[in-house]
Amino acid sequence: MAADGSSGTFSWRSLFADKLVESKGSKQVEVPVDEALKGKHVALYFSAHWCPPCRAFTPKLANTYSKLKKDGKEFEVVFVSMDKNQAQFDDYFGSMPWMAVPFRDDQLRSVLSRKFKVQGIPHLVLLAPDSTVLCGNARAAVAADPNGENFPWQGAEEPK
């Protein structure tokens, strides 16, 4: 049985609801979750504009993301904002090449933070295409393997 309760394949909607957003210039466009993430490894990126370590890590993650996409890897990043307001989210998310949980969905952002035991940011968790956790500390994996040669990263335990 799939995680969404059906007998079919896993649905990312069971984790994210129906829509994510992606940045298109100065606008944010809604993207159907299952269409965007089907069959992909997904990294949940918990981060915030106000966090200096996050702002230092984001460009490194963006470089790794670009390399993996260029190499044809089935990979996507979903930004889960810990920003304090919509303006901070908009400014920070506008610099990112991936999708995000809509800022207005603060309940979902909180649920994801608890589910994946986020105790500090930046925090990156790599999920398999069926949403199982492959790497609970993917931030360290990206730092150790910036070219993604060992992708999909596995084995790093979640922080306690």
Image: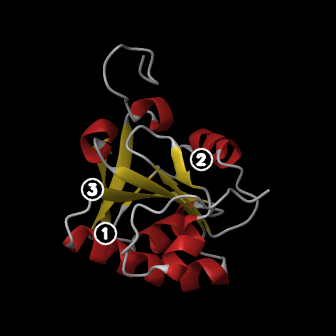
The residue indicated by pointer 2 is: 109
Apparent side of residue 160 relative to residue 23 in the rendered image (left or right):
right
> Of callouts 2 and 3, which one flags the residue occurring earlier in the amino acid sequence?
3
Q: Residues within 10 Å of mark 3 (few under 14, many from 20)?
A: some
Local SS, label 3: loop
> Quadrant where the N terminus lies?
top left
Marks 2/3: CA–CA distance: 24 Å
Local SS, label 1: loop
> Of callouts 1 and 3, which one flags the residue occurring earlier in the amino acid sequence?
1
Q: Nearer the viewer, residue 157 or 35?
A: 157
Label at residue 18: none
x, y percent for residue 31:
29, 46
The residue indicated by pointer 1 is: 26
Residue beneath the point at 43% across and 47% down: 128
- The answer to whether any part of residue 104 appears in the image is no
Residue beneath the point at 31% across and 19% down: 8
> Of callouts 1 and 2, which one flags the residue occurring earlier in the amino acid sequence?
1
Local SS, label 2: helix
Q: Nearer the viewer, residue 153 or 55?
A: 153
Q: Nearer the viewer, residue 14 or 129?
A: 129
The residue indicated by pointer 3 is: 74
Is the residue 158 above or below the residue 20 in the image?
below
Residue beneath the point at 46% across and 40% down: 131
User: Mark 1: which amino acid?
Assistant: Ser
Residues at marks 2 and 3 touching, judged by CB atoms closer than 8 Å: no
Q: Residues within 10 Å of mark 1 (few under 14, many from 20)?
A: few
User: Mark 2: which amino acid?
Assistant: Arg
User: From the viewer's perspective, is the residue at label 1 or at label 3 nearer?
Assistant: 3
Q: Nearer the viewer, residue 11 or 31?
A: 11
